[in-house]
Image (cartoon, rainbow, N blue to C red):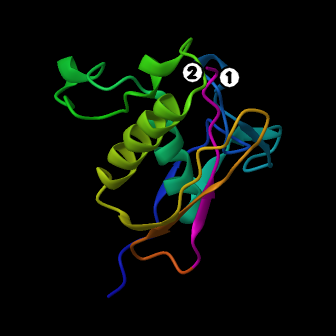
């Protein structure tokens, strides 16, 4: 029997963000009962994982320790304000890899690019029980 498809409340409707301040619950127009016209939207399947990985990268590692999730998050926040040098980009790559592989749903990382200044990139992750690779982008202002 196949595992049930993951479903989470959608808080990153474009599956990108640069801070927790850019995230919020998303509304979806629907009419489950007469007079209702909206409900909370959900992220399903691969989109659920894409959102979870984005939240993992945006969360400072250790900030959820009081909830029992000591290792959850990433260290990318430590690089904010640093000079955009090859060393800093290698640290960003290392912190990203560590955070992504910490999620048990990630099978492998197919492509990870830390761009030079004035470039953008999308990371590509192969997830367990998901057919297509998941693309994910995050910006860390150096």
* Label 2 to label 1: alpha-carbon separation: 5 Å
For the point 66% across and 32% down, which residue is it? 17
Q: Nearer the viewer, residue 72 or 99?
A: 99
Is 87 inside the magenta-drawn segment?
no
- Say left or right for 136 vs 54: right
Is 132 left or right of 102, judged from the image as shown?
right
Q: Is residue 76 left or right of residue 19?
A: left
Q: Which mark is residue 35?
A: none
Q: Is residue 137 magenta?
A: yes
Main SS category, magenta section: loop
Quarter of the figure that contains the N terminus: bottom left
Q: Residue furthest top?
A: 81
Q: Are discs 2 and 1 less than 8 Å apart at CB?
A: yes
Q: Nearer the viewer, residue 79 or 87?
A: 87
Q: In this picture, which residue range is highlighted in magenta? A: 132-142
Q: Secondary structure at mark 1?
A: helix
Question: Which residue is depicted at the point 55% across and 53% down?
Answer: 50
Q: Tell me if mark 1 has few (under 14), some (14-19) or many (20+) residues whose alpha carbon lies within 10 angstroms of its own.
A: few
Element type at marker 2?
Answer: helix
| Vertical placement of residue 86 versus 48, above or below | above
Q: Is residue 92 above or below residue 46?
A: above
Q: Is residue 75 above or below residue 12?
A: above
Query: Residue tagged by mark 2?
Result: 20
Q: In this figure, which residue is indicated by the disc labeled 1?
A: 22
Q: Is residue 89 above or below residue 33?
A: above
Counting from the top left corner in percent of width and height, residue 101 is at 33, 55
Q: Residue at x 61, y 20 (%)?
A: 142
């Amino acid at each position: 029997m196949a595992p049930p498809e993951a479903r989470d409340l959608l808080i990153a409707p474009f599956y990108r963000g640069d801070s927790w301040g850019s995230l919020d619950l998303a509304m979806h127009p629907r009419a489950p009962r007469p007079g209702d016209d909206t409900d909370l939207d959900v992220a399903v399947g691969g989109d659920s994982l894409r959102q979870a990985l984005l939240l993992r990268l945006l969360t400072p590692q250790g900030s959820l320790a009081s909830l029992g999730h000591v290792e959850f998050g990433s260290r990318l926040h430590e690089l904010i304000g640093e000079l955009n040098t090859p060393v800093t980009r290698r640290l960003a790559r290392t912190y990203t890899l560590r955070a992504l592989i910490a999620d048990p749903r990630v099978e492998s990382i197919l492509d990870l690019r830390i761009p030079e200044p004035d470039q953008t990139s999308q990371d590509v992750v192969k997830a367990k029980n998901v057919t297509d690779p998941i693309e994910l982008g995050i910006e860390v202002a150096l």
